[in-house]
């Protein structure tokens, strides 16, 4: 029986125990959530670029990125067959809202409701990216005295119930005290505290780090790498990746008109182009002979930023990309969007069953603590048994201990262990540190060698107690890899 099946079974048991109560209705919703797409919240401080990044992940400019009313409301973006926007007021029934779409962005009429009266907005939109993941756009986290920030805390770090998000993508400009406070609170002590398994850090607006220079992303990658190895950061997020959010959004919504305008800049001699792009003000006003109006230039800056205009014109001049499709793909790669999507896939989507089971079990554990009924003790015991015995949760605990510094050893041993238990992705190739195109025979050979290596370490009398416990978990992970490879042969 899989972890998801075990979780469903104990939920069914609990629903019978709490039949007729509000708890039962809540648990039915939790059970339905097991079969729904993974829920990933996009969070961060004010002006971190959350809505822009969310648009890039969806592939459409849906979320408003200006400081309008809707940016102060928690907004869910989910897949569906129709285009619809619903508001869930804090009091009263949910209602449909009218909306228009101007220049791709949804403009929502709140129907007389103020942002403070709305618990959440739900945007249903047919989009391929939303078929596997529901994205939650949250107001910026600043001072806790600010109402929008409290909404985000109330959603992702509730005091009396489980968080509706299975995982979080957290945008950082630098590691602020408020970021640490929020991420620590988002992790729960039942399964993963202080494990970063359900959090990814994004060094946002990465192109601004180098003041728009062409090597800005290289500088951002070095900073992200340093953050990713920082002990304090590793306890909070599983990985840190740099993303130029504005360029990422533009990459997936690029138009032929924009490419034609950029070709004019690319056609200039290198020296003239460099002078034109010295500053935003100069780009808007200089060289009237270029054939672009001030409004067109301002629109390009709004869509690409100065870094993006410099980069795209250079790519076109050097013929690295010659068509809009090629340019879109190149910009997605260079903005960091492709890398972020790959990390979300390997660290979240490949682990979706574990993350969803984890969320459901935490909700169930909270219910059994809050309301004791005949039969609830048996449910609580079953939850504890799953959490204690399910191997994916044991891997999370070891990963937690590694990131917290509770399990120590030689650097190569710790790195090997972290990969084997899924710290860099759940696929066999990720765990065994092999190329994505490694053959089944290569994977099986590497898994066999890893199994022998960690069996020896688990049994060696000089191995510390903590490492011996971790080694036994690694042995089980290797056995699982071999079993899976055997099924594929």
Image (cartoon, rainbow, N blue to C red):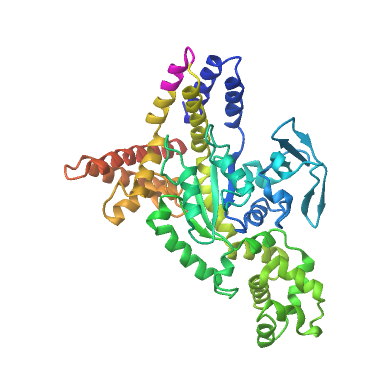
Left or right of residue 157: residue 286: right
Q: Main secondary structure of the magenta part?
A: helix
The image quarter containing residue 190 is: top left
Left or right of residue 382: residue 37: right
As rendered, which of 191 and 253 lies closer to the eye? 191
Residue under the image location 50 percent in, 41 percent down: 351
The single residue placed furthest to the top in the displayed view is 374
x and y, in percent, of residue 123 in the image: 72, 42
As rendered, which of 47 and 201 lies closer to the eye? 47
x and y, in percent, of residue 285 in the image: 76, 81
Quadrant where the C terminus sits is top left
Report how many numbered discs are placed on residues in the image.
0
Instruction: Please determine whether, in this image, residue 7 is positioned above or below residue 476.
Output: above
The image quarter containing residue 217 is: bottom right
As rendered, which of 110 and 130 lies closer to the eye? 110
Residue under the image location 45 percent in, 55 percent down: 435
Does 377 appear in magenta?
yes
Highlighted range, magenta: 373-381
Instruction: Please determine whether, in this image, residue 238 is positioned above or below residue 87.
Output: below
As rendered, which of 58 and 359 lies closer to the eye? 359
Q: Is residue 16 something that shows in the picture?
A: yes
Q: Is residue 483 something that shows in the picture?
A: no
The single residue placed furthest to the front in the displayed view is 145
x and y, in percent, of residue 54 in the image: 64, 52
Residue under the image location 81 percent in, 72 percent down: 295
Does 201 appear in magenta?
no
x and y, in percent, of residue 356 in the image: 53, 35
């Amino acid at each position: 029986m899989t972890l998801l099946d075990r979780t469903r079974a104990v939920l069914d048991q609990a629903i019978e125990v709490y039949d007729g109560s509000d708890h039962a209705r809540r648990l039915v919703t939790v059970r339905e959530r097991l079969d729904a797409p993974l829920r990933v919240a996009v969070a961060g401080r004010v002006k971190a670029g959350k809505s822009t990044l969310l648009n890039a992940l969806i592939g459409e400019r849906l979320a408003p990125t200006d400081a309008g009313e809707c940016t102060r409301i928690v907004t869910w973006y989910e897949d569906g067959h129709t285009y619809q926007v619903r508001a869930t007021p804090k009091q009263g029934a949910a209602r449909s809202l009218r909306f228009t779409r101007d220049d791709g962005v949804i403009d929502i009429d709140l129907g007389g409701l103020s942002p403070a009266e709305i618990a959440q907005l739900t945007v249903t939109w047919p989009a391929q990216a939303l078929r596997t993941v529901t994205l939650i756009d949250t107001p910026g986290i600043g001072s806790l005295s600010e109402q929008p920030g409290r909404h985000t805390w109330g959603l992702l770090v509730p005091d009396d119930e489980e968080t509706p998000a299975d995982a979080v993508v957290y945008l950082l400009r630098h590691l602020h005290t408020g970021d640490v406070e929020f991420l620590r609170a988002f992790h729960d002590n039942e399964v993963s505290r202080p494990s970063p398994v359900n959090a990814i850090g994004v060094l946002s607006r990465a192109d601004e780090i180098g003041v728009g220079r062409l090597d800005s992303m290289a500088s951002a990658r070095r900073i992200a790498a340093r953050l990713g190895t920082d002990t304090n950061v590793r306890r909070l997020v599983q990985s840190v990746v740099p993303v130029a959010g504005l360029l990422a959004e533009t990459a997936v919504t690029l138009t032929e008109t924009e490419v034609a305008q950029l070709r004019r800049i690319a056609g200039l001699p290198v020296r003239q182009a460099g002078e034109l792009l010295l500053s935003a003000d100069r780009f808007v006003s200089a060289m009237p002979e270029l054939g672009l109006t001030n409004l067109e230039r301002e629109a390009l800056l709004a869509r690409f930023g100065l870094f993006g205009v410099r980069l795209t014109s250079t790519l076109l001049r050097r013929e690295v990309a010659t068509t809009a499709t090629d340019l879109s793909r190149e910009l997605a790669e260079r903005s960091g969007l492709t890398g972020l999507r790959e990390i979300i896939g390997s660290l979240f989507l490949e682990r979706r069953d574990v993350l969803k089971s984890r969320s459901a079990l935490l909700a169930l554990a909270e219910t059994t603590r809050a309301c004791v009924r005949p039969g609830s003790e048996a449910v609580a015991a079953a939850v504890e048994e799953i959490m204690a015995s399910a191997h994916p949760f044991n891997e999370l605990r070891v990963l937690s201990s590694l990131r917290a510094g509770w399990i120590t050893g030689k650097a190569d041993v710790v790195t090997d262990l972290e990969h084997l238990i899924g710290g860099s992705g759940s696929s066999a190739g990720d765990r065994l540190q092999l190329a994505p195109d490694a053959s089944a025979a290569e994977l099986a050979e590497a898994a066999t060698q890893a199994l022998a290596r960690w069996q020896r370490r688990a049994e060696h009398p000089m191995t510390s107690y903590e490492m011996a416990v971790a080694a036994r978990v690694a042995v089980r992970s290797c056995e699982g890899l071999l079993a899976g490879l055997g099924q594929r042969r």
